[in-house]
Amino acid sequence: MKLRRLSTRDPGFEAEFGRLVAVDSAIDKGIERAAEAIVDDVRARGDAAVLEYTNRFDRMAVASVADLEISQAEMSEAFEGLPADQRDALRAAAEILEASGEGDGPTIRIAMTTGDVEEIDAGSDER
């Protein structure tokens, strides 16, 4: 796995960070507006909205948020059913998340779909 670190103090940080977080311009603005409306509704109505959208989009008949919970046994079974490379990627991501609170400053970590993990360090000169 390739790991790269960028500091906000580096020349060119803004351009490199912009490249990493760029959104494809082909995204349908209607989908974006619909997603924003759903998020706003969930913020306003909470669990009731989550249940409504779950029943509508996932075609599930759930009466409470508790019905959506996944047990530790179910998660373990799903994890073990993954190909080894995907399990390794999830383990690596977990390690990064666990370590993200360490260091002198805030850190933004972005997992790329290519399998590489790129790290943008927003507060440390350490390389």
Image (cartoon, rainbow, N blue to C red):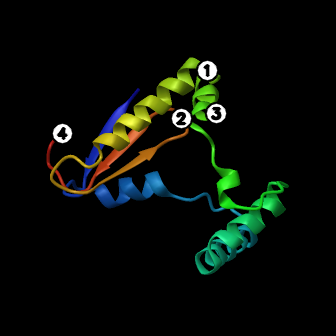
Q: Compute the Cα span from label 4 to label 3.
A: 39 Å
Q: Earlier in the sequence, mark 4 or mark 3?
A: 3
The label number, if any, that marks residue 127 in the structure image = 4
Tell me the CA gap for discs 1 and 3.
17 Å
Measured Cα–Cα span from mark 3 to mark 2: 27 Å
Q: Position of residue 29 (x, y in %)?
A: 70, 71
Circle 3 residues within 10 Å: few <14, some 14–19, many ≥20: few
**Sequence-first tag of 3 and 2:** 3
- Residue tagged 3: 74
Name the N-terminal-most of marks 2 and 1: 1
User: Which residue sits at x=59%, y=22%?
Assistant: 80
Looking at the picture, tell me which residue is in the foreground, 125 or 77: 77
Instruction: Estimate how packed mark 1 is, as few (under 14), some (14 to 19) or many (20 or more) residues with alpha carbons within 10 Å.
Output: few
Identify the residue at image location x=65%, y=55%: 66
* Front residue (pair 54, 20): 54
Identify the residue under disc 1: 83
Residue 114's disc is 2
